[in-house]
Amino acid sequence: LEHLKKYPCDIFLFDTFKNDKFGGTGEVFDWRFLKNVKALKKPFIVSGGLSPENAGLLIREFHPFGVDVSSGVEKAPGKKGCQLIKKFIDVVNAVSNETNHPV
């Protein structure tokens, strides 16, 4: 994490990176990296492979400032599903209330 301390930013965004793709890969960001992020003392947003099934675990374990979702709420490639979006939001809200950590 030392290399991140040199960036004069107010918030970090952690996402999966692939050389040959631009966003929406559906691959889960490596959460092991987040274990020491609190030492930065800056809020962070997590993106990369989030879905209604794993967003709650992420929030419970790492308490991000925010979460970003794209392909995790698609019913088909490029087509968002209203029910999946609602489920994602419901999970985020429920865990935020349960942990008293707004996201």
Image: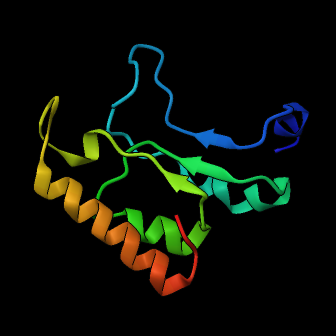
Image quadrant assignment for residue 57: bottom left
Percent position (x, y) of residue 3? 85, 34
Q: Residue at x 77, y 42 (%)?
A: 10
Give the colour scheme shown: rainbow
Q: Is residue 38 left or right of residue 96?
A: right
Location of residue 40 with respect to 6 vertically, above or below:
below
In the shown orientation, is residue 32 left or right of residue 4?
A: left
In the rendered view, does 27 fall on the left or right side of 66? left
How many marks do you count on the picture? 0
Residue at point 77% right, 61% down?
A: 38
Residue for point 22% across, 48% down: 73
Q: List the single residue furthest toward the bottom.
A: 98
Q: Is residue 44 left or right of residue 93?
A: right
Q: Classify the position of the N terminus by image quarter.
A: top right
Q: Where is residue 48 drawn, in percent x and y?
A: 43, 42
Q: Quadrant of residue 76?
A: top left
User: At which x and y percent is residue 8?
Assistant: 86, 32
- Looking at this view, is 28 or 56 the one in front? 56
Quarter occupied by residue 36: bottom right
| Residue 50, x across and y down, in percent | 37, 51
65 versus 15 height, above or below: below
Q: Is residue 70 above or below residue 39?
A: above
In the image shown, does 37 or 67 lie closer to the viewer? 67
